[in-house]
Image (tube, rainbow, N blue to C red):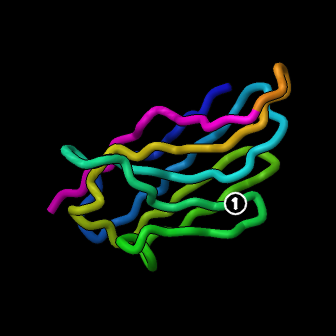
Amino acid sequence: VQLQAFGGGLVQAGGSLRLSCTASGNILSADDMGWYRQAPGNQRELVAQISRGGHRIYADSVKGRFTISRDNAKNTVALQMNSLKFEDIAVYYCNAMLTIRTPLQYGDYWGQGTLVTVSS
C-alpha cells in the first residue's frame, strides 16, 4: 500500500497550489483522508480532513483559503490552496485511514511529504 503525493512547489504569496495524493495497493476502502503539515521547528499539524461521506474539517488558519476534496472511486484526496501566505510554508503530508484486503487490517497510512514554499 502506498500513498503518493504530488503538487508541492514554490509560489508567490497570494498565489495558489494544488496538492493531490493517491492511495494505491490492496485497498478495500478508504475512510478519513487528509493533509497534515510540518514547518521547521514545529510539530506536525492537521490542515484539513475529509470523511468518506464528504464531511470536512479545516484548521482555523486555512479556513476560507484551502479546500479539500476526494474521489472515493480513485482513492485520491486533493488540497486546493489559495491565497498562500508565508506561514503556509511547510512539508505537507497526505494521510488516509485504509482497510487493506490481505491480510484484512485497518490502519493509518502516510504519504511522503511534499514541500510548499511561499516567496515574496
Which residue is more in the foreground, 12 or 23? Answer: 23
* Residue 61 in view here: yes
How far across and how far down the image is residue 60, in percent? 40, 74
Q: Quadrant of the N terminus?
A: top right
Task: Give left or right: position of 67 versus 41.
Answer: right
* Above or below, 22 relative to 64: above
Which residue is more in the foreground, 117 or 32? Answer: 32
Judged from this view, the residue extending furthest toward the bottom is: 64
Give yes or no for residue 119 being in the magenta stretch: yes
Which residue: 46% across, 43% down?
Answer: 93
How far across and how far down the image is residue 74, in percent? 76, 45
Task: Give left or right: position of 72 versus 90.
Answer: right
Which residue: 26% across, 50% down?
Answer: 117
Name the amino acid type tagged 1: Ser
Judged from this view, the residue extending furthest toward the top is: 103
Give yes or no for residue 47 being in the magenta stretch: no
Q: Quadrant of the C terminus?
A: bottom left
Quadrant assignment, res 26: top right
Quadrant assignment, res 84: bottom left
**What span is in magenta?**
106-120
Figure disc tally: 1
How far across and how far down the image is residue 46, in percent? 45, 56
Which residue is the site of mark 1? 51
* Residue 9 in view here: no
Q: Please tell me how crowded label 1 is: few (under 14), some (14-19), or many (20+) other residues with Cα within 10 Å.
A: some
* Above or below, 104 relative to 56: above
Task: Give left or right: position of 40 versus 58.
Answer: left
Which residue is more in the foreground, 31 or 4? Answer: 31
Quadrant assignment, res 119: bottom left
Judged from this view, the residue extending furthest toward the left is: 120
